[in-house]
Image (spheres, rainbow, N blue to C red):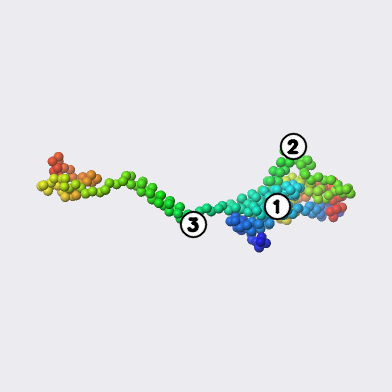
């Protein structure tokens, strides 16, 4: 029945190990575990809310872009004060009269008398 | 309800459970709960503690399920790993004063002979099992009681198959030695 050295043989050891039978999980444990189901993260953003939020962000971004690019409120464009320039001899080129605003760089130099310099 | 899902793989059940499918979670729990309870019970020898550990293990798994990677560890392996760590925590908590591993002092299994003078075979065997070194204990539980192959157990213990075989042989040898004093009672009642 035993091994030559007097110890239990394999069958006897297996029989002894077989004596251990684990407990079945209690009903209470099973119920508790069933209640532990993972809670997926709730989605608070519905489609309609998402669209509204995107629209608001777009409007906000456009506003910010506009403010960034137009440093100040641009003054209304007014025609050059042609009437204020006296040119009875017609010596001032028409282009200077028409584009005579402050923003247009002059390429033609004039004398103190207003005559073009050579 | 859970029976309908019995053919579905663990990873798929986890995926469904993570999306709020209660029946998938129930099927998953029913599939693994008994094994986890048994695993903890074999190692601790106490049903209440085993159920506590199983509950904590499944609770952690419920959180883990939300980020579960299908290509990662198998569910059962993950559960055993967590349960094993919790078992170690319990074992440490039982002996906060003496660091010396003396299972005689820490085991809660009280072996007392019956009125007729015979020992309770289950208690004797369980006490011997709990007294095994942890790795021997685990591989014996996995292979003998949980039905894993040596190769599968080796994977779960992260050792080579050869090392697992050696570990199992040592576990059986240790059990024989531990049961030697009660051999006559065990042979008389067990065979």
All told, the count of numbered labels is 3
Give the residue pinned by disc 3: A47
Q: Disc 1 marks which residue?
A: A29
Query: Which badge, 1 or 3, comes first in the chain's sequence?
Result: 1
Instruction: Return the residue found at the far left.
Output: A89
Chain letter belonging to callout 1: A
- Judge by depth and name the residue closer to the eye, B137 or B92: B92
Measuring 73% from the left and 52% from the top, which residue is drawn there? Answer: B38
Residue pictured at 68% horizontal, 46% vertical: B85
| Res B16 → quadrant | bottom right
Judge depth for marks 2 and 3 and give the one in front: 3
Q: Residues within 10 Å of mark 2 (few under 14, many from 20)?
A: few
Q: Residue at x 36, y 48 (%)?
A: A66
Q: Which residue is mark 2?
A: B98
Q: Image check: B130 left or right of B15?
A: right
Measure how far apart labels 2 and 1 are at the Cα level. Answer: 33 Å
Q: Is residue A20 left or right of residue B115?
A: left
Circle 1 — which element?
helix
| Real-space CA distance between mark 1 and mark 3, rounded to the nearest whole angstrom | 40 Å
Image height check: is B78 above or below B96?
A: below
Dots 2 and 1 on the same chain: no
Q: Quadrant of the N terminus of chain B?
A: bottom right
Q: Would you say residue A85 is visible in this rendering? A: yes
């Amino acid at each position: 029945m035993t091994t030559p050295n007097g110890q239990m043989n394999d069958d006897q050891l297996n029989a002894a190990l077989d004596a251990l039978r684990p407990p079945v999980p209690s009903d209470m444990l099973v119920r508790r575990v069933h209640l532990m189901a993972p809670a997926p993260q709730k989605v608070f953003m519905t489609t309609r809310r998402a669209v509204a939020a995107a629209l608001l962000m777009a409007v906000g971004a456009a506003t910010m872009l506009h403010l960034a690019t137009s440093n100040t409120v641009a003054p209304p464009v007014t025609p050059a004060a042609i009437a204020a320039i006296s040119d009875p001899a017609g010596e001032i080129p028409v282009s200077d009269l028409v584009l005579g605003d402050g923003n247009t760089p002059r390429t033609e130099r004039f004398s103190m008398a207003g005559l073009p310099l050579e | 309800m859970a029976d309908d899902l019995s053919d579905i793989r663990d990873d798929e059940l986890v995926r469904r459970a993570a999306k709020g499918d209660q029946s998938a979670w129930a099927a998953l729990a029913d599939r693994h709960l008994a094994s986890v309870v048994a695993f903890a019970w074999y190692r601790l020898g106490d049903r209440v503690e085993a159920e506590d550990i199983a509950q904590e293990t499944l609770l952690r798994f419920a959180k883990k399920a939300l980020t579960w990677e299908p290509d990662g560890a198998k569910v059962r392996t993950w559960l055993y790993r967590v349960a094993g760590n919790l078992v170690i925590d319990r074992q440490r908590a039982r002996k906060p004063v003496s660091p010396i591993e003396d299972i005689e002092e820490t085991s809660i299994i009280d072996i007392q002979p019956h009125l007729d003078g015979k020992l309770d075979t289950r208690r004797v065997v369980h006490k011997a099992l709990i007294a095994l070194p942890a790795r021997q204990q685990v591989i014996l539980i996995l292979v003998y009681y949980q039905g894993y192959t040596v190769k599968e157990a080796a994977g779960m213990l992260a050792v080579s198959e050869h090392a697992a075989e050696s570990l199992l042989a040592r576990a059986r040898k240790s059990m024989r030695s531990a049961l030697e004093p009660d051999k006559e009672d065990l042979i008389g009642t067990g065979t």
